[in-house]
Image: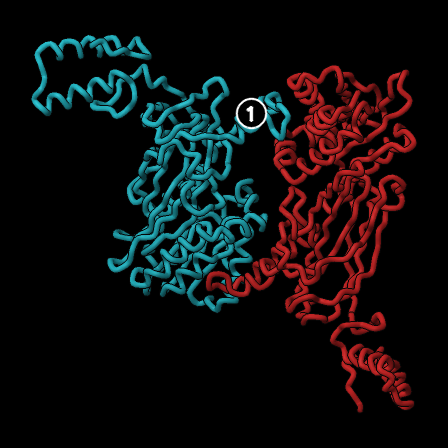
Chain colours: A cyan, B red
Amino acid sequence: MKNIPESANNDEYFKSYEDLEVHELMLLDVERTTAYGNAIRQNEELFKDKIVMDIGCGTGILSVFCAQAGAKKVFAIEASNVAGICEEVVAENNLENIIDVFHGKVEDFQLPADINGVDIIVSEWMGFYLLHESMLESFLFARDNFLNKDGLLFPDTASIYTAPCQLPQMFELWEEYLGVRMTSFRQRLREQKSTKPEIVPLSAEQLLHSGELMSWIDLKTVCQEDVDNISETFFMLSESHGNFQGVCIWFECTFPSSSDQTPITLSTSPGQPATHWKQTVIVLPEISVLTVEPNEAIAYELSIKRNKSTARGYTLQLDQIDADEIDHPIPCDCIMTKCILFKAHLKKLENGQLEDDDDEELEEEQDENSENKETTLRN
Amino acid sequence: MKNIPESANNDEYFKSYEDLEVHELMLLDVERTTAYGNAIRQNEELFKDKIVMDIGCGTGILSVFCAQAGAKKVFAIEASNVAGICEEVVAENNLENIIDVFHGKVEDFQLPADINGVDIIVSEWMGFYLLHESMLESFLFARDNFLNKDGLLFPDTASIYTAPCQLPQMFELWEEYLGVRMTSFRQRLREQKSTKPEIVPLSAEQLLHSGELMSWIDLKTVCQEDVDNISETFFMLSESHGNFQGVCIWFECTFPSSSDQTPITLSTSPGQPATHWKQTVIVLPEISVLTVEPNEAIAYELSIKRNKSTARGYTLQLDQIDADEIDHPIPCDCIMTKCILFKAHLKKLENGQLEDDDDEELEEEQDENSENKETTLRN
């Protein structure tokens, strides 16, 4: 193992990775580790005789995967003292000739003089809701400083999704829990939890919508600034009857593959097998909860903004939008009268049944809709 | 809510119970909460018009159960500031006239002048491996100072069990995890974990024996000193083929019941539905692991000893005993040659087939057994 000199490894963030139970948790996340294992070992064609860099290699399992897939050289870089264990793992797999372990930050790393760049960068840098921990920055630093032109990133895309969800365990459950009313406990619990997003496992049934893309990130071209402040407005039609009690966030990553292989996706969606990332949930205040019907519109603005003071943290902000107060797409399948009217109107148009005065009425309808939550059918 | 004066509530232990997610975890432990709920509400006969004390009432759910079961008065005592939430829960269940909430330690509590004692003490005082946290002491203090003669304790018995177990996730798993040898990681992980017992969920299949009683505690009569140092030697025959890699500890509590009701048991055994206590496991050093056959003897000494310095903590100590080196019961069903011989001898005796010289040979056999791990059949 080589020590990368300079800019001391005294970061609290790296200290947290000295707890081996954190590594146990990550390794035993079979979905995570197998996704990387498959993405690497099923694509020997991509790795054969290549120079690879593994950033934040931890115990080194991804570096071993790369060597097993035929890499000529792997630079395994780990800032925490777990680098020492990585060195031992490399030895017990008899890969000392292929994997070089470096203890230090990738920002301080220098390639050997005879190597100009690496062919592939592998890293498991993702945090809760993808961006928590901000390790992406080191991944992008390595891409910009070490990756050869036409080099590959594992993973090479990342997507953040969101959907409105039901959280019965945080709401209805306490109305009468085992025969006891506990709404005051619920309220205090909610207050305690309101300062941070919840990291909880959700079932697909808890989602009111299968989810919309919040951000698609091409890791080959993205800059850190592009993901410092992601903000989107969402308009979705509820896919079931239920209570809009929170907003769920999850992510997916995809990996490059050779032409004869199906690309591997690592998904942390509620519909997929559980991972240690679980899902991230922003819980609505009780007063904001809405009961929704199938096809009822739900709207909110969600932003994920990097903190200036503690650069590894992000602030998640959710602003609910009254779906009755905003413009809906045209046509819209929701159950609001104006949208039903527009659709009927459109259908008549298609069928050539429209009479002249129908048009005027619809315009009036549209004008009034911005004030009225419920529009009434006047014909 | 009344504040109990004196001896400030500045104990770090009580501070830890100000985290409402701890209460959420306990409440959502359905096995735990339902066991208390059933033990109390299915025994209205015992609670009707009785004076009850709930020690460490937390959010107050057990106090509400008691009131629902017909208690005339419940003194709900909570040392942490969660007493304030308990007061609110009592109010939303309209039980202010029955449940009096006290913020403070039971050791500082005084009964109202017109009440001489309580008829029932309810408390969920159990920690990991029963005794962790040492809240039992407060339960016994209340019993000795406030419980009427012939009063009832909920629960009134507690039992600690132990069994040898297999821990593949801590041993075999890392021999080749997803195609990578990671025994060096395992070793370091084990070193990190060796300072404290593991609190993990075990399946019944991981047990090599269905378990033996380590300590049966009659809560009506036990003194704190009786449980300050529990130490027992165990001799068990493995019930399956497997690797003796650790020792599992769990507990059960039983509750009083009226004559027409089945007594309720709260069990934290690996064979029962999971609770938040999970199981406590002492992991053996790798060098001590034994592969055992069905009916092979396993022996160990286990002690649970209260720490003198930090009175809420206990030290668990496991000493492995070479089962070949100790006296086995007579007869013994184990697979050691001497025990097989004794059993055969006994059978002959029973069948009246014994000849004179057989006796002498067996005596010799017995003498040699303390030296020999394997005795050989000489006839």
Q: Chain of mark 1?
A: A
Q: Which three-letter amino acid code belongs to the residue tagged 1?
A: Arg
Residue A286: % across, % down = 50, 20
Q: Is residue A55 left or right of residue B95?
A: left
The residue carrying mark 1 is A190
Q: Residue at x 65, y 49 (%)?
A: B272
The image quadrant that residue A270 belongs to is top left
Q: Residues within 10 Å of mark 1 (few under 14, many from 20)?
A: some
In front: A264, or B212?
B212
Can residue A176 be seen in this snapshot? yes
Q: Is residue B195 left or right of residue A67?
A: right
Q: Is residue A127 left or right of residue B268?
A: left
Residue B377 to residue A273: above or below: below
Numbered disc 1: secondary structure? helix
Residue B325: % across, % down = 81, 73
Residue A149: % across, % down = 26, 51
Q: Which quadrant of the rendered structure holds the C terminus of chain B?
A: bottom right
